[in-house]
Image (spheres, helix red, strand yellow):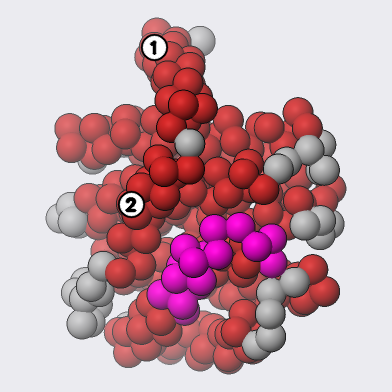
Amino acid sequence: MTHSTTTITAQHALQRRALLKAGAAAGAATMAGALGLGLALASRPAHAQVANLNDAINKAGRQRMLSQRMGKAWLALAHKVQEPAARQVLEQSVALFERQLAELKSYAPNPTIRNTYGQLDAAWVSHKATLLTGTPALAGATAMLQADARVLALAHQGTVQYESASGKPVGHLVNVAGRQRMLSQRMAKFYLAAQLPVDAAVAAAEIAKARTEFIAATEVLRKAPEASDRIRQELLLADGQWVFFDAALQRMQAGGVAGSTARQVSEVFVASENLLSSMDRVTGLYAALAG
């Protein structure tokens, strides 16, 4: 283990103790206040159009995240936790997904990318119906997750194609940072699915896989030659959010599928929103770098 890794591990241990102590004392009022950080992402004004290829990669990657964030919000409504916030997240994420889908289709620089976004448009029409028709409940969860997987696959395909069109190292970093946003929502989504429960064993495996990928990608972003002091500072802030989120996720392993209370499910929802906000800032900073 390197000195750098040892230092980061020590920082995480200290942050974990501090954050868990603060979380236990703060209660629901702190959770409600913290949630505002995540909701700010959905309400933030979007660019009227795609500015350049870095911006395209950023927005394409955000579509991946939104596919998982909408699923998470739907499942929170099925759980009947964080209902006003979850409904707001779902509605605003649907609107942002549709706006960015139109922008990315219009900007597409070649027929291959245009074809991908044509397919995504069709998959989105079907998925939107699963999200917004009827009342979220266990009975509809499997169909929703299947539709969201198709949307995620095409959104990822489009992001990779935009990165390839860029052909520059910074484009790859924008993709990696943007994928962290998606992983934060994917882990939370599968946590909520497992607790419903829907395919709990599959959900646990997906969480473990996403967790490993998230930790590895964080180090890639931190050690990248292009990482500015501001980016590294934002990554340190994200580390703090990750410690709290990861602790919430690990309680599922300790307690089993039926071990989480409504409050713990709510905590995962809130923590994932805050981690998302941190990683969205990191992605934006990478996207703002000159190619």
Quadrant of the image occupied by residue 135:
bottom right
> Which residue is pictured at 46% across the width and 77% down the height?
91
Asked whether residue 84 is drawn in magenta, I would say: yes
Residue for point 37% across, 60% down = 39
Categorize mark 1 by other alpha carbons within 10 Å: few (<14), some (14-19), many (20+).
few
Q: Where is residue 132 in the image (x, y as percent from the top left)?
A: 60, 84
Residue mark closest to the camera, 1 vs 2: 2
**In which image quadrant can residue 22 be found?**
top left
Q: Residue 37 — which label?
A: 2
Kindly tell me whether residue 2 is visible in this rendering: no
Q: In this view, does 210 lie to the left or right of 180?
A: right
284 displayed left or right of 207 = left
Residue 151 % position (x, y)? 59, 75
What residue is at 62 percent from the left and 80 percent from the top? 131
Range covered by the magenta-colored residues: 78-94
x%, y% of residue 68?
Answer: 56, 63
Amino acid at circle 1: Thr
